Image (tube, helix red, strand yellow):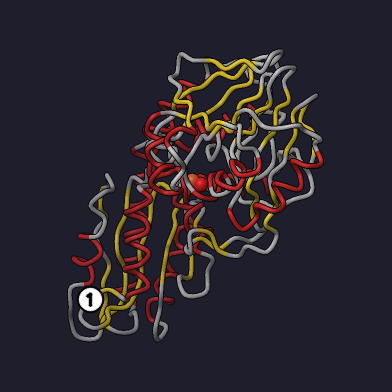
Amino acid sequence: MRMLKQGIYAVGAQDWDRKVFDELIPLNEGTSYNAYLIKGSDKTALIDTVDPQKTEILINNLLKCGIDGIDYVVSNHCEQDHSGSIGDILLLYPQAKVVTNAKNKEFLINHLHIEEDKFIVITEDDSISLGDKTLKFAFIPWVHWPETMATYLVEDKILFPCDMFGSHLAGSELFAVCDANQYNQAKGYYAEIMMPFRAAIRKNLEKLSKFDFDMIAPSHGPVYKEPEFIINAYNDWSGEAVKNHVLIAYVSMHGSTKKMVEYLTDELIDRGIPVNPFNLINGNIGHLAIDLVDSATVILAGPQVLAGAHPALANAAFLANALRPKTKFATVIGSYGWGGKMVENIAAMLGNLKIELYEPVMIKGLPRDEDYQLLEKLADSIVEKHKSIGIY
Ligand code: FEO
């Protein structure tokens, strides 16, 4: 239990051992489920709760705060890593009411079976007084569920935006060290959770700017005492600008595709274009997601197998399509033995993306000189396209 400002405590839980989130995303440094207790002169509010597996830690932290009771449990978001302990909190503090919007009320009733009479439903115009402290609200739908909202503590200038601005980091430090590691952790979190909702993110960044906050306390990872660090990053990631960078996501069975990837990588480096050749078989898929955030070009490379795309490449294409990056250009390269529809397979899987396609480079067997020349031509095309949007 740690203190953000006078009377405001971090009472959530670190999950040091968690290795995978959503049964999809590998976690390098665990995660945290942040909950915050606000002791006003008249009333006490709890902002969000924790994953149900960590309820005991939340309750122990609350007991350490020496409170008589909880009046309000503010639920910013229904997903169970933040709402999963609400039922236990209501059992422990039966006078508490769950404060949230109408949509989240419906979600919480469906997902947690919380009783109807436990709710106080608020609108964006409402405020709740805790005595010397006041809570205000902003509905920020689709970061990343439709019911999501943020709570603002007026007198202390703290924004509690739940998942928005989060990072999967377990740590003993309450406050963020705004360095490269924190940036990358937050970028990975953005890529996996927020990126598909880029337009909503931009709209909600604008909406939140009405609050005069000097601290952001998200529901995962450390608290920002320098909010501009993460606000600037979100403006950058969710904006339209892409970077002079190429991501090559590849799989190779017998080495032919790998030779093509290595050759293209060198050709791009020679032309001054940063490139990340990402091995889909042994790479951390979280790093792939990070590169999808702002790479101008994505190349999907693999062998043709069973008359179509290798399943690992199809999985990468499916993920890229679901995450909806702002990538501008893409293509497919690879090697085949006798024929198939790999290019058509992959192209059909990228329907969500607004991309211009380079000419694919599909070669028969091990690459020959003329195949390498096609890769040189592709590298030249990438330079031209990056020039055309002013990033080269
Ligand atoms: Fe951290 Fe959408 O839950």
Where's the N terminus, which quadrant? top right
Name the one closer to the observer, 96 or 234. Answer: 96
Q: Secondary structure at mark 1?
A: strand
Q: Which residue position is annotated with label 1?
A: 308
At 70% from the left and 27% from the top, the residue drawn is 38
Q: Is residue 213 above or below residue 301?
A: above
Q: Residue 183: tell me if it is visible.
A: yes
Where's the C terminus, which quadrant? top left
At 30% from the left and 64% from the top, the residue drawn is 332
Name the one closer to the observer, 296 or 36. Answer: 36
Judged left or right of residue 219, residue 37 is right
- The x and y percentages for residue 74 are 56, 31
At 69% from the left and 36% from the top, the residue drawn is 223
The amino acid type found where label 1 is placed reads Gly
- The x and y percentages for residue 148 are 45, 35
Name the one closer to the observer, 236 or 216. Answer: 216
At 23% from the left and 76% from the top, the residue drawn is 308
**Label 1, residues with CA under 10 Å away: few <14, some 14-19, many ≥20:** some
Q: Is residue 259 above or below residue 182?
A: below
- The x and y percentages for residue 104 are 42, 36
Is the CB of the residue bearing disc 1 within 8 angstroms of ligand 1? Answer: no
Q: Is residue 90 above or below residue 8?
A: below
Q: Is residue 7 above or below residue 163?
A: above
Judged left or right of residue 107, residue 211 is right
User: Where on the picture, by quarter, is residue 156?
Assistant: top right
- The x and y percentages for residue 362 are 26, 72
Q: Residue 244: tell me if it is visible.
A: no
